[in-house]
Structures are given as structure tokens and as C-alpha cells.
Amino acid sequence: SFLEDVVPQAPEDPLFGLMAAYRKDTYEGKVDLGIGAYRDNNAKPWVLPVVKMADEILRSDPNLNHEYLPIAGLQDFTQPSQRLILGPDSPAIKDKRTVSLQTISGTGAVHLGALFLSKFYKANTDRAVYFSSPTWANHNQIFSNVSLPIKTYPYFSAKTKGLDFDGMMSTISSAPEGSIILLHACAHNPTGVDPTQEQWKKIAVVMRERSHFPFFDCAYQGFASGDLAKDAWAVRYFVEQGFELCIAQSYAKNFGLYGERAGCFHFVTGAAPDAEKTIGRIASQLTILQRSEISNPPAYGARIAALVLNDDKLFAEWEANLRTMSGRIIDMRKALRSKLEELGTPGTWNHITDQIGMFSFTGLNEKQVLTLREESHVYMTKNGRISMAGLNTQNIDYFAKAVDKVVR
Ligand code: PMP
């Protein structure tokens, strides 16, 4: 084949490789802390009660069919999605300065944004997108695929296992004017470390001074704190400050709709007399990109989310379900920290409860991670990240003791 010498073997996706290794392990007490998907206290996937309710409503609708959705997706889904992330009274909605397209979950939204920016973002000549170090591994691939140069800003301090705020600020303020800065809206993946509201305000100040473009990746709204508005605070603050920005919104975690691929991409322009016209042009280009990439998005997950987002009763049930998930995770954080402290495990463990969301960056090194896998059948990524949702009242003692052993 003419491809013989030019198509090298690609490495296996590390996360999906880890899942395969876990499945192969026959040890009964094995612990899966790899993949970022919610598990209940019995380590089982959890279909949200509100999703079951919406599903029943959908199934009983005699007019439901399998026709294509419009290119930009289901309006009953994209409109309330705007209100959910931007806030119901957002000026960016009232002024019609926001365009929203339904996407293939958060990944598709990040991709659509990256593709649009690669084509149209020309704010500076040596343009680049800046990621936190570390970031969700897929960011690198998605932006590389559309040939946007990638740089990083410091984010995680190995010493405090918290935010390296000075490092972050210093790189963002020295980045060429008009750089694209990718920000995790809440529950940073993989570290679980978020800026405080005071820190967000300072980040906004430098970004404004340097005319940077914020690209918010929001994969955990409501899942992080249990409070939808709180988890959207940073995005809403930047919009209030008049930034032109974009948002990738995923419903995988907060609705448990992982495989249904429900998500949304939003582009918000700054307030200007001709903003509505500008947004119309942006919408027309996004529509063409979407058409060439996926034609139109999948319907089922968006229909489920739309039913819930547009109905007060279902919405309240959803909020209760969010509190169940975030509450269980917060309980596991407290339990893990106190168990390690009781065992007198060397080091400090306050970061376990300081961090938020699906993940915790434990500070365990690669060698310790591999020892945990070989000796204790505990599976986590090599960077020491654990999915908090993999812990439950039945395995947390076992896990704490395994960590204690490997740290000593
Ligand atoms: N961004 C971040 C930071 C994430 O953690 C995830 C989920 N792993 C996503 C985007 C997108 O996930 P999905 O495509 O399943 O919505």
C-alpha cells in the first residue's frame, strides 16, 4: 500500500486502555477510579430519575419520529441551554448576541469552536491557544487537528496541590495580545482545582488588558457543587464584563447522558450596535461548518434534556438529582481525607476536600500508581488522578489503606 511508510501505529488512548485492563482483572475487590463517569454507592452507572421520567414522556408520544433535526439542532434544547449557562436574565440573550448550535456533546462543541476559530480568528499573527498545564488530554488533539498552535499556562502547583495562581497570571499576562485562553468553567479536569471568585476577577482583568479571547469548556455545571448558578459563575462574570467569548457545554455528566452525546456550542459577541448582525454572520458560518462535519446532531439526548430544561417540575427534580451526585462525591472526599489522616498517612490530605468535581489530583506519582494497580488492583491514570465517583462506602477503607501502604 502507498500508506505503508507514512501511517505509523498510533498509541492506544491511555484512558480507554486503562478501562480494558480493569475489565480483564479478575480480582473481586478491584477498584475502578479511571473513567470520569458517575457511579452510585454500588459502583454502578446511575440513570438519573429525572431522565427516566423524561424518557417515559418521550416514549408515550405517538408523534415521535426519527426525522433529522435542523443543522443547528433542536431549538427547544439550544434556547434553554443558553439560559442555563448564561443565566435567565443575561444581556447576551436579551440583546440577541448569542448563537447556539447543538453539538456531539462537549467534545463536539470544543471541536466546533476550535474549527471556527482556526478559520476566522486572526486577532494576532502568531496566534495560539493556551491550555492549563495539565488539561483534559483531548484538548491537545482537538486543537492540533485544526492546526491551531498550542501553548500552555501553569495551573497546578505540585507543592500545594492547589492552583499555581501566580504562574497562571504571569503567563497569561505575557502571552501575545489576542491569544485564545482555554478555561475550565468549573471542576477543572484533571486536577479538581478551580480559581476562587476573587482569582477569576483578576484573571478577567489581565485578559481584558491583553485583549485575550476566552474559550470556556463547561463539562460539569451543577455536577461540581450541586448548584447550577454557582458552577456557571465564572462564565456569567466574563459575559458581564463584556467579553466576546465562546462556550462548550456538555450534558454528559450533569444529566448522565454520556453516550447520547448531548451538548451545545455558544458564541457570545460583545455588546455593540451591530452585534445582532455580527452574530448572524457568525451563525451562518457555524452552520456551514456543522453541515460539513455532522450534517445535524443526534436527537434523543437533546430531547430528554429539552423536556427537563423546559418544565419547572422536572427541572426541580433534576436539581435534586444533581445534589445527590455532587453530595455523594463530596461525602467521599471527606471520608477519604479523614481516613488517610486517621491512618497517619505521610503528607497532607486537605487537597482532597479542597478540590471539587469528578476528579482529584492525589499527588501520587507514576510509580505509586503502578504499584497500586499491581498490588492492590486499584486503577487510576498515571498522573495520579482519581475519579471520586469510583469510591463508595464499600471500597473506601480498602482504597485508603492501599494508598497508605504505597506512600510509606
Ligand atoms: N471537556 C472536559 C474538560 C471534560 O472533562 C469532558 C469530559 N471528559 C469534556 C470536555 C467532554 O466530554 P463529552 O464529549 O463526553 O461531553
Image (cartoon, rainbow, N blue to C red):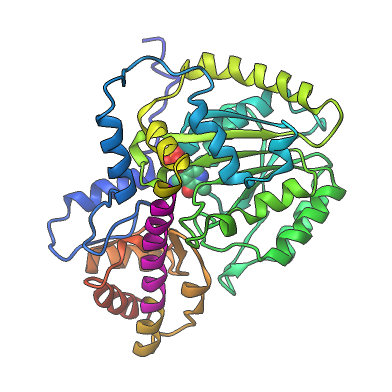
Q: In this view, which residue lies farthest toward the top? A: 2
Nearer to us in this view, 147 or 94: 94
* Magenta segment includes 322: yes
Tell me if residue 364 can be seen.
Answer: yes
Give the image location of residue 55, x and y in percent: 29, 37
Left or right: 243, with 112 as reference point: right
Q: Which picture quadrant has residue 56?
A: top left
Give the image location of residue 377, x and y in percent: 22, 63
Nearer to us in this view, 355 or 365: 355
Is 54 placed above or below 346 here? above
Q: Which picture quadrant has residue 389?
A: bottom left
State the residue at coordinates (46%, 73%). 352
Nearer to us in this view, 381 or 211: 211
Q: Which picture quadrant has residue 298?
A: top left
Dominant secondary-structure state across the stretch colored magenta = helix
Magenta segment: 315-335
State the residue at coordinates (59%, 74%). 160
State the residue at coordinates (44%, 42%). 311
Tell me if residue 386 can be seen.
Answer: no
Give the image location of residue 204, x and y in percent: 77, 54
Left or right: 173, with 112 as reference point: right
Please identify the quadrant where the N terminus is shown.
top left
